[in-house]
Amino acid sequence: MEKKRVVSIQTRNNLILDSLLFVSGLITAISGIYFLFLPVAGYQGGRNPLYGVTIFFERHAWSDIHIWASVAIMLFAALHIPLHWKWIINMTKSGVKTVFGKSKLNKYSQFNLGINIMIGLSGLICGLSGLYFLLVPGAFHNSIIPDPMWLFTSITWDLIHTWSGVIAIAASTLHFYIHWKWFYKVFRKYGQAFGKNLKGNPANQPVSAQQV
């Protein structure tokens, strides 16, 4: 007999991918906040009051964590878009029609669409600027190679990366706030199913309740 699914395949896939996005995004945000408050390294002749401060890991470890968590979130985001492509197309069409007065989205849908646009744009800018630092020789801080100055100086790229990241974090937090009930319901279903499986397993029942 085919085992009954707890949720649909699409819901399961969304849950897995959204959970991966959440975890990688959280790690990226925390490591990014670390660099936001400790932007420079080195003794700097005593001008750096935070020199030698270690928060859980050394600075280079935080850098590695931030880089690879960011790579992960870009990968998961790239997989996330096809799963929601129909929604993106439909909401974009509705948004355009609303702008030109041919249709009208309710306030909740407008807010949700606006948040998703903010996440998309800020995430794209943050990701591209991060790739600039990762892939372009000389762009990284304290590099011995001269600043390549592609379009902007490295300082400007850093500001773009920082504040697009701040916007992405804020927008993603609002996005999670809007959809947290969905997460709760799905996880609750899995929890209930897990509990039923435990109760239905004879190995987990008292001896008196088992057939002898």
Image (tube, rainbow, N blue to C red):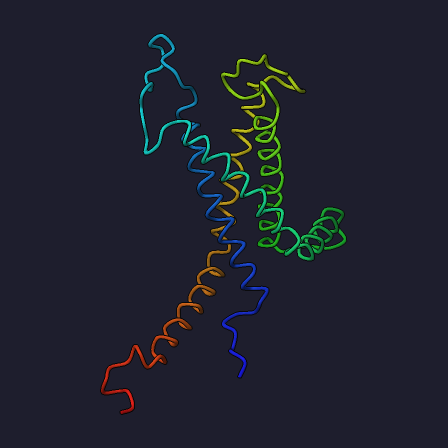
When the figure is inspected, residue 97 is found, relative to residue 149, above or below; the finding is below
Instruction: Give the residue at the far front of this rendering.
Output: 212
When the figure is inspected, residue 205 is found, relative to residue 50, above or below; the finding is below
When the figure is inspected, residue 172 is found, relative to residue 140, above or below; the finding is below
Name the side, left or right, on which 106 lies relative to 52. right
Q: Quadrant of residue 35?
A: top left
| Relative depth, front residue between 101 and 89 | 89
Residue drawn 67% across the image and 52% down it: 88
Name the side, left or right, on which 146 lies relative to 200. right
Residue drawn 62% across the image and 56% down it: 106
Q: Quadrant of residue 58?
A: top left
Instruction: Give the residue at the far left of this rendering.
Output: 208
**x, y percent for residue 135:** 60, 27
| Relative depth, front residue between 30 and 62 | 62
Q: How many marks?
A: 0
When the figure is inspected, residue 36 is found, relative to residue 179, above or below; the finding is above
**x, y percent for residue 37:** 40, 26
Residue drawn 44% across the image and 61% down it: 184
**x, y percent for residue 130:** 57, 31
Instruction: Give the residue at the far bottom of this rendering.
Output: 212
**x, y percent for residue 121:** 62, 38
Name the side, left or right, on which 108 lies relative to 210. right
Name the side, left or right, on which 90 lies relative to 121. right
Instruction: Give the residue at the far top of this rendering.
Output: 45
Quarter placement of the C terminus: bottom left
Residue drawn 32% across the image and 16% down it: 49
| Relative depth, front residue between 198 and 155 | 198
